[in-house]
Image (tube, grey):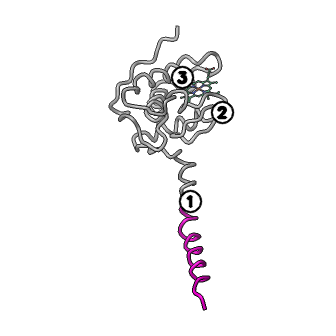
């Protein structure tokens, strides 16, 4: 009698036992982290962005997928390659949006003060960083003052 059916069944069983849970766990992980490695120091900023920006924006690192406003991964880092050199400019752009609003379509003051700074730092360090971690240490990076909206 041929052993072949047993070998095929064995291979099939191995696939079920090993591969399927691996795929399922990988998917669950993606939904939570957006496949971005968030440093412990940035969890507070992530929570602020998750709670206050998610109804409108997509940002993989915060696990948010809103569609009312622009996708922040794509808008802020169109090349898909964020870097430490871009951090200050991105931070300034986000703190400007939060402080002054955007063209009457994004309300100003969704977050203010320390919370606005923490959210802006998170977005600047993680936008476009899919499959990667932060571009800078947000606790030591330069954070220019919020703009005067006039
Ligand atoms: C009520 C929906 C809404 C919420 C909540 C919201 N935004 Fe926005 N945001 C928008 C819209 C809409 C735009 C695009 C405005 C336009 O350009 O027409 C925008 C634009 C932006 C921009 C781009 C500004 C630029 O320079 O082009 C940034 C950055 C931004 N939002 C960050 C945030 C962050 C961070 C949060 C959470 C703290 C947030 N937004 C919460 C609706 C929202």
Q: Earlier in the sequence, mark 1 or mark 2?
A: 1
Numbered range of the magenta stretch: 1-25
Picture coordinates of residue 50, whole percent (x, y): 56, 38
Question: 27 above or below 95?
Answer: below
* Residue most extreme to the left: 140
Quadrant of the rendered image containing residue 43: top left
Quick one: label 1, few (<14), some, or many (20+) residues within 10 Å? few
Q: Is 23 colored magenta in this rendering?
A: yes
Q: Residue at x 53, y 62 (%)?
A: 22
User: Residue 108: which disc?
Assistant: none
Q: Is 40 colored magenta in this rendering?
A: no
* Residue most extreme to the right: 68
Q: Is mark 3 within 8 Å of ligand 1?
A: yes
Q: Which residue is mark 1?
A: 23
SS at mark 2?
Answer: loop
Q: Main secondary structure of the magenta part?
A: helix
SS at mark 1?
Answer: helix
Q: Which residue is mark 2?
A: 67
**Quadrant hosting ligand 1:** top right
Q: Which residue is mark 3?
A: 98
Picture coordinates of residue 79, whole percent (x, y): 49, 30
Question: 108 above or below 51?
Answer: above
**Of 36 and 1, the residue lying toward us:** 1
The reply, left or right, for residue 27 in relation to residue 113 is right
Q: Residue at x 55, y 36 (%)?
A: 59
* Residue most extreme to the front: 2
């Amino acid at each position: 009698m041929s052993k072949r059916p047993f070998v095929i069944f064995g291979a099939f069983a191995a696939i079920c036992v090993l591969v399927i849970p691996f795929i399922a766990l990988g998917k669950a992980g993606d939904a939570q982290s957006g496949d971005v490695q968030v440093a412990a120091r940035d969890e507070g900023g992530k929570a602020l962005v998750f709670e206050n920006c998610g109804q409108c924006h997509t940002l993989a690192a915060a696990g948010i997928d809103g569609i009312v406003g622009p996708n922040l991964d794509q808008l802020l880092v169109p090349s898909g390659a964020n870097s430490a050199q871009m951090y200050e400019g991105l931070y300034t752009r986000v703190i400007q949006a939060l402080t002054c609003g955007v063209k009457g379509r994004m309300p100003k003051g969704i977050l203010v003060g320390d919370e606005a700074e923490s959210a802006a730092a998170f977005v600047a360090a993680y936008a476009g960083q899919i499959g990667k971690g932060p571009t800078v240490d947000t606790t030591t990076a330069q954070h220019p003052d919020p703009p005067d909206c006039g």
